């Protein structure tokens, strides 16, 4: 096997049909520009009885999964959630495959029961489970009329941002827009082209939150095409701050770091962050055309979207729920593989973790849906992921409380006692940006524990200003 090839494993179980087996093999091998190898495996090497009376000889058993980048389970029991529109089951679709490149690809309008699920996971050399297949260029139909378009970011941390094109007849609406860099613009134009559209056709941007990787490309494209931009009203303060030349970059974060006793970190960040000219700031953060002010219903691209304010990641974060189609455009509120940072805002809310957990509860109280996140692959159940996130923060709150009980007084001391990232790294081993995020994350947990009466906080006037000291209640 050639090093670096993308390994596609097709699992063939009893009852598989020729089309099931043929489609992945045809799609991946008919594109010589992409280095795929297709492995067909069964429960064990040998003969598999197909659903049409045919038999398949498979050379590999389930251990073929170990090194798979993409897995096609073709069994009847692996149904993805149903997407129904107009009472009909969804057309055959292979979520995760590039669309808009018809040659050799699956017919998306072919009849079928849509029972395929694609899992795309890669195990990197350090042992983290990361999925990278979702970042590959293209437009991927995740549900009928919903196309996921991953766009590149200038920094590698999050790997890519998904924007979603909702297309029906002549109507084209985008959820999120990407980071305004030339590579992202080119990728978006290519993907839209595959859908028979151009940027000028975009009628409206619905933006989940004001962060650069979601908002700035909307502003750039509006300048050329006059596209309407809508954003959550809670982001207004952040945009106002960006226009205020007297406010330093990361002002909110720096204030939290100081209160948490991380003065060294404040100095290190202040020395390394370019503050950006006021012109730059205004250029990136123009105001939207309109604000989502509370829950509302939109009719766009032939569907009904409920706009739900979900403060937490930012003050004005919103998600878009298409209840009829069973899909949730979750922005950064619910991410499938990482936990979103809490309160990463110019004007940090007083208790952002409480806001965030409240927003998770709101989503959990609504019907379950296919999770369409801004970073990471689509996932079958919003509820399942929300439960995991709630559990994560519950455990984190306990660890934080225990750290205080064991003698850590300042936010910085607590942060240094907690493990970070899935790999449980030490705080001191994180880079500067992630150390800042880690302290802010701990601050959010401490704040919630204080508001719950589980901890007490008092101000202590140090040489560097007021520091908060925590103790158990
Ligand atoms: Zn983001």
Image (tube, rainbow, N blue to C red):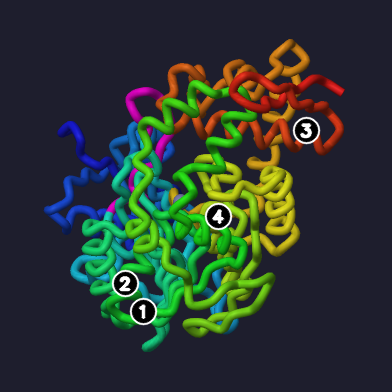
Residues rendered magenta in the picture: 123-136
Residue at 35% x, 48% y is: 276
Distance between the Cα atoms at labels 4 and 2?
A: 32 Å
Write down the residue under mark 3.
449
Q: Is residue 336 visible?
A: yes
Count residues near mark 3 (Cα–Cα under 10 Å), then give few for <14, some for 14-19, many for 20+.
Answer: many
Count residues near mark 2 (Cα–Cα under 10 Å), then give few for <14, some for 14-19, many for 20+.
Answer: some
Q: Position of residue 114 (x, y in %)?
A: 47, 66
Count residues near mark 1 (Cα–Cα under 10 Å), then give few for <14, some for 14-19, many for 20+.
Answer: many
Within 8 Å: ligand 1 and the Cβ of disc 4? Answer: no
Q: Determine whether label 1 and label 2 are within 8 Å by CB.
A: yes
Write down the residue under mark 4.
380
User: Could you say which is closer to the camera, residue 404 or residue 128?
Assistant: 404
Residue at 72% x, 63% y is: 366
Q: Position of residue 291 (x, y in %)?
A: 57, 73
Which of pointers 4 and 2 lies earlier in the amino acid sequence? 2
Secondary element type, mark 3: helix
Q: Which image quadrant for residue 200?
A: bottom left
Q: Which label is found at residue 221?
A: 2
The C terminus: image quadrant: top right
């Amino acid at each position: 096997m050639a090093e670096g090839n993308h390994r596609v494993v097709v699992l063939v179980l009893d009852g598989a049909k020729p089309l099931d087996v043929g489609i992945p093999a045809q799609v991946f091998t008919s594109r010589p520009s992409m280095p795929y190898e297709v492995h067909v495996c069964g429960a064990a090497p040998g003969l598999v009885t197909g659903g049409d009376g045919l038999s398949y000889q498979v050379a590999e058993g389930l251990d073929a999964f170990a090194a798979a980048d993409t897995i096609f389970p073709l069994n009847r029991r692996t149904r993805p959630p149903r997407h129904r529109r107009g009472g009909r089951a969804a057309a055959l679709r292979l979520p995760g495959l590039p669309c808009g490149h018809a040659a050799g690809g699956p017919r998306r309008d072919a009849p079928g029961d849509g029972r395929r699920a694609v899992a795309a996971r890669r195990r990197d050399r350090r042992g983290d489970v990361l999925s990278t297949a979702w970042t590959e260029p293209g437009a991927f139909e995740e549900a009928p009329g919903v196309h996921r378009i991953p766009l590149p970011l200038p920094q590698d941390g999050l790997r890519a941002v998904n924007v979603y094109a909702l297309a029906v007849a002549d109507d084209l609406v985008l959820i999120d827009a990407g980071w305004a860099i030339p590579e992202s613009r080119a990728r978006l134009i290519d993907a839209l082209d595959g859908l028979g559209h151009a940027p000028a056709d975009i009628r409206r941007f619905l933006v989940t939150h004001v962060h650069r990787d979601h908002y700035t490309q909307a502003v750039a494209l509006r300048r050329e095409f006059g596209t309407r931009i809508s954003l959550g009203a809670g982001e207004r303060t952040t945009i106002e701050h960006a226009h205020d030349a007297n406010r330093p970059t990361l002002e909110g974060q720096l204030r939290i770091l100081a209160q948490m006793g991380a003065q060294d970190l404040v100095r290190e960040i202040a020395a390394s962050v370019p503050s950006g000219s006021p012109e730059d700031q205004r250029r990136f953060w123009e105001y939207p055309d309109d604000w989502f002010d509370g829950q509302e219903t939109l009719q766009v691209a032939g569907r009904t979207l409920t706009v739900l304010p979900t403060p937490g990641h930012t003050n004005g974060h919103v998600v878009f729920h298409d209840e009829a189609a069973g899909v949730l455009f979750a922005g950064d509120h619910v991410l499938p593989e990482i936990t979103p940072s809490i309160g990463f805002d110019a004007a940090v809310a007083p208790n952002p973790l409480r806001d965030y957990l409240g927003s998770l509860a709101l989503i959990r109280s609504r019907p379950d849906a296919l999770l369409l996140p801004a970073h990471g692959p689509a996932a079958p159940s919003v509820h399942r992921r929300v439960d995991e996130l709630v559990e994560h923060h519950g455990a984190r709150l306990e660890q934080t409380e225990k750290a205080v009980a064991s003698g850590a007084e300042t936010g910085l001391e607590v942060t240094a006692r907690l493990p970070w990232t899935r790999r449980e790294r030490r705080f001191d081993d994180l880079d500067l940006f992630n150390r800042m995020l880690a302290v802010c994350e701990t601050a959010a947990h401490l704040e919630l524990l204080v508001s719950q009466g589980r901890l007490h906080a008092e101000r202590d006037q140090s040489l560097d200003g007021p520091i908060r000291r925590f103790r158990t209640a």
